[in-house]
Amino acid sequence: MSDLNKLTLSAARDLLRKKDVTSVELTEACLQAKSAGMALNAFVHDTSEVALEQAKAADNRLAEGDASSMCGIPIGIKDLFCTKGVPSQAASKILDGFRPEYESTVSQKLFDGGAVMVGKLNMDEFAMGSSNETSIYGDVVNPWKVDQRNLTPGGSSGGSAAAVAGDLCLAATGTDTGGSIRQPAAFTGIVGIKPTYGRCSRWGVVAFASSLDQAGPMTKSVRDAAIMLETMCGHDPKDSTSADLAVPNFEACLTGDIKSKKIAIPKEYRMDGMSEEIEKLWAEGTEMLRDAGAEIVGVSLPHTKYALPAYYVIAPAEASSNLARYDGVRFGRRANISAGDGITEMYEKTRAEGFGPEVQRRIMIGTYVLSAGFYDAYYNRARRVRTLIKKDFDDVFAKGVDAILTPATPSAAFSLGDMATMDPVQMYLNDVFTVTVNLAGLPGISIPAGLDAQGLPLGLQLIGKPWKEGDLLNTAYALEKSVGFVEKPEKWW
Amino acid sequence: MSIDKATAAKVAKLARIKVEDDALPALAEEFNMILGFIEQLNEVDVEGVKPMTSVTPQRLKRRVDQITDGDQQALVLSNAPDAREGFFAVPKVVE
């Protein structure tokens, strides 16, 4: 069978169960595609040997007939996840050479389920970025291309998005603090879901902003997302914010029946200067859901406008605290110091050399908003606004709304380098539709919904009620069927 | 509120990031741009609103107060840039 790397996760699972294909065959196909796809710069640490061993073990499990849905599936793991004995450096120079002595809970669950690690995936440094241009490994290139320009795959899970869209692996893990799964999924024409805060354990995932970070799958279809998410979720005593709730069979939720579901369209997401294409896409998505039997209602989420500024207080504040651990003492890279330098100089030089400009900027903004005299004016005010943003959603859901439909991003993928001369705030605006969801701790999914006039993918986002990922996935599944998005990037690499 | 060069230097010091003197004015300018964006929050009436502490209403789980882990000195030190005789080694701390 040819082009095994192009299969969806669910199709591969079915073939594995029927013994029509082996995990070793699937894995070899992905490893070949990975080698041929170096131009995308999606994979950063080679784990081919691990992958083939895992694939053989998965084939044995499959032969015994006792295997989960993920058994034998070749996936990529974002570099933010600590993987035992395999370099895990969050795309930062400061973690150069770090090989964890432990496995993150999410990757452990995937491996326990029999998943195969094709490699570690490129990303923005410490997950801070929306274009995958802050990585120590260099930019990731979007497989989608319409002219000679190289486009961004989005960020921070840009390597995950490019690898899945370019068929270098069947699916990948991502993480999402302000939109880092959903925005790159939209830019590359794939599906990405950020579950409810607390669904996936954060243990062993390099922390950026602990009250916002969530892991999730990035896949080629909604069904694939349901399958992979189920394996990633579940209570973990090692993460005190992990929810002790039963994990439903998400795939079984995919009936495609959304009759009498109430879908809300929030008026505040219609931004000034929004492109006609995005507006049209949104309207078409709305009509499709209506045609599928859903009831469409207009709602207001009045504090939407304040989500980004609140995020750019809270996330840097938490980051400044989380990233204090990178001090050149316990792990990672220490700067060379001069004779007479004490420990403070060692810290300052290590952190100046080890962190890139965007990470330094956010650490310092976080330090400032938490410093004496400004804590109330910035940090506490932002946390109050966060309470109001969550209340906006609570009020809407209290009216019987099942899901909220919005655009995923304000534009299609832009060129790498395009934002280099802009001020940092322009880049932050990429997350305008996704960041509210993190602040409110809700599940959100981005699905491909069409191509723009240039031929680049655009996504729509569905936002669900807390812990109702099954219902959200089903609505996304219904929309996916109506949209019928089948376009793939033309292979140029 | 405007950040000057001295404040930028102070923030860099607090964050333990070495910033050369000649880079401070540009840094201060960036801070001001980002803080200008954040200033929008002042438009919101937050009177009587509690700062969010947990996004999902949950009670922290408790467990029996007993040792569950430990005795992993070699693993703990395995990634240290400089480990000697079972300890992390650092430059002189006390003057």
Image (cartoon, coloured by chain):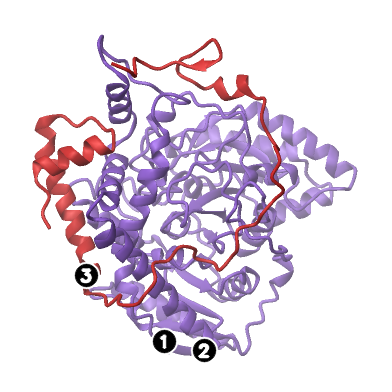
The amino acid at mark 1 is: Val
User: Disc 2 designates what residue?
Assistant: A399
- Label drawn at residue A299: 1
SS at mark 3 in the image? helix
Work out whether residue A262 or residue A63 is closer to the camera in this orientation and state it. A262
Residue A85, compared with residue A202, is above or below; it is above
User: Disc 3 designates what residue?
Assistant: B42
Gap in angstroms between the C-alphas marked 3 and 2: 29 Å
On the rendered structure, is A200 left or right of A281?
right
For the residues tagged 3 and 2, is the chain the same?
no
For the residues tagged 3 and 1, is the chain the same?
no
Q: Position of residue A286 (x, y in %)?
A: 47, 82
Work out whether residue A430 or residue A293 is closer to the camera in this orientation and state it. A430
Which chain, by letter, is purple? A
Specify the quadrant of the image occupied by residue A243: bottom right
Which chain, by letter, is red? B
